[in-house]
Image (cartoon, grey):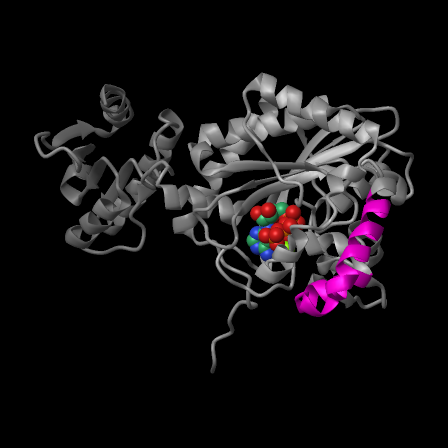
Amino acid sequence: MARIQSVRGMSDILPGETSQWQYLESVVRALLSRYGYQEIRFPILEQTELFKRSIGEVTDIVEKEMYTFADRNGDSLTLRPEGTASCVRACEQNGLLHNQQQRLWYAGPMFRHERPQKGRLRQFHQIGVETFGMAGPDIDAELIALTARLWRELGINEALTLELNSIGTAESRGRYKAALVDYLAGFVDELDEDSQRRLGTNPLRILDSKSPRTQELLKDAPVLKDYLDDAANAHFSGLCARLDQMGIAYRINTRLVRGLDYYGLTVFEWTTEKLGAQGTVCAGGRYDGLVEQLGGRATPAVGFAMGVERLVLLLETLGVMPASAPSADVFIVAVGERAEIAALTLAERIREGAPQLKVQSNCGGGSFKSQFKKADKSGARWALVLGEEELSRGEVAIKPLRDAAAEQQLVAISAVVDQLTGAAAEQ
Ligand code: ATP
Ligand code: MG
């Protein structure tokens, strides 16, 4: 029978890769905790309406990328394409936003029906950070400082550039959109197909176009910056001043817009040239209108999400991933049924007395030779050898596997924990 394959664009993350994910996750987790952020977890499925109302009906995500289906009751549900909308829904529903400030994070899979390629999957993973109840540029600056520190701690800061823009209030974006459409209307035939379509639906996204001709036309187009009001300008210069003060470099990109409708004022992206076309590893911005749009009270909010696959790729590409630790420190070799039973007890005794050591029992029989092969492959520093003869004397042989000069020793079973603990401390 034909083997069943995974769904296209949805990858398995194999044991050889999970240590890299765990490393990244543990660094992020520790850092977020140092900044006082708390984890929140919410479902992977939501009512479709949540994403339509937040991300926007005429965005790429809602128009063509969502996994939407009717469940057995006929309700329209969607696998979350991102976390912000769900996070707002969860906070609002559980009363976390009323007169409170929140600094939150989450991690997990997101789903978008895109064309799979390097750094672009249909199930991908994000670590997202969202803050609520803080209106000034200081929290924007804190979030950016947090990401900048993360890149330094991961050793990838030199490969990343911060791009920054302000897309103003909905009102000024409205005036700018009208001006942009007016200008581009004179060149409709020269625009790429996507941009032609967006002219009538989401003209700001035209600024994002990858078409060289469209980009050429945009050179003389009106600039969003000229349409910002004083409050937006003050917020943006406040943010820039704080970043300058903290020594965080950025590039102002007046064409940076985001593909989701809820953003306003600050938007930013961290990008790299090391990953080819999928170079954005982290993206975010302010979304002061979203809570109200979803039925809550007006609440200032700002956040970002990073793409875990792309970050893992970057860590690999730059060769800054720490070597993964071997799966065992101690490997127990046992031949014969009596020895196999004794091996399990001995393994438990070591796990009890020396919890810092990773202990692997052979399990599954085999000759001394084949068991030693497994011991070697496990990366363990010591093999403990249990044979009939040793057993009848109440002894175990401790054989060093990584140090050619060290000799095998016979030790009483009752002394094994002390012996291993002492040897481990010496190294
Ligand atoms: P892109 O422009 O690359 O499509 P986006 O603007 O759609 O990104 P966001 O919705 O802002 O992305 O998501 C934040 C981050 O999540 C991105 O910067 C990226 O690192 C990651 N990401 C988004 N879509 C995918 C995907 N299909 N596969 C892998 N990672 C993704
Ligand atoms: Mg996208």
Residue 177 position (above or below residue 67)? above
Residue 14 position within the rendered picture, expressed as x and y whole percent measured from the top left = 44, 54
Who is closer to the viewer here, 391 or 321?
A: 321
Q: Is residue 182 magenta?
A: yes
In the picture, the quarter occupied by the C terminus is top left
Residue 267 position within the rendered picture, expressed as x and y whole percent measured from the top left = 69, 38
Please report the bounds of the magenta region as a residue range. Answer: 173-200
Who is closer to the viewer here, 73 or 201?
A: 201
Residue 349 position within the rendered picture, expressed as x and y whole percent measured from the top left = 35, 31
Q: Is residue 319 left or right of residue 182?
A: left
Residue 329 position within the rendered picture, expressed as x and y whole percent measured from the top left = 29, 35
Q: Going 32% across and 42% down the picture, which residue do you hit?
A: 360
Residue 110 visible somewhere in the drawing: no
Q: Is residue 346 left or right of residue 204?
A: left
State the predominant SS element of the stretch in magenta.
Answer: helix
Q: Going 71% across and 70% down the picture, which residue do you hit?
A: 189
Quarter occupied by residue 419: top left
Q: Going 25% across and 27% down the picture, which residue do you hit?
A: 416
Q: Is residue 387 left or right of residue 84?
A: left
Residue 196 position (above or below residue 165)? below
Q: Is residue 247 magenta?
A: no
Quarter occupied by residue 420: top left
Quarter occupied by residue 383: top left
Q: Going 70% across and 32% down the picture, which residue do you hit?
A: 104
Q: Quick one: which residue is furthest to the bottom in this view?
A: 1
Residue 224 visible somewhere in the drawing: yes
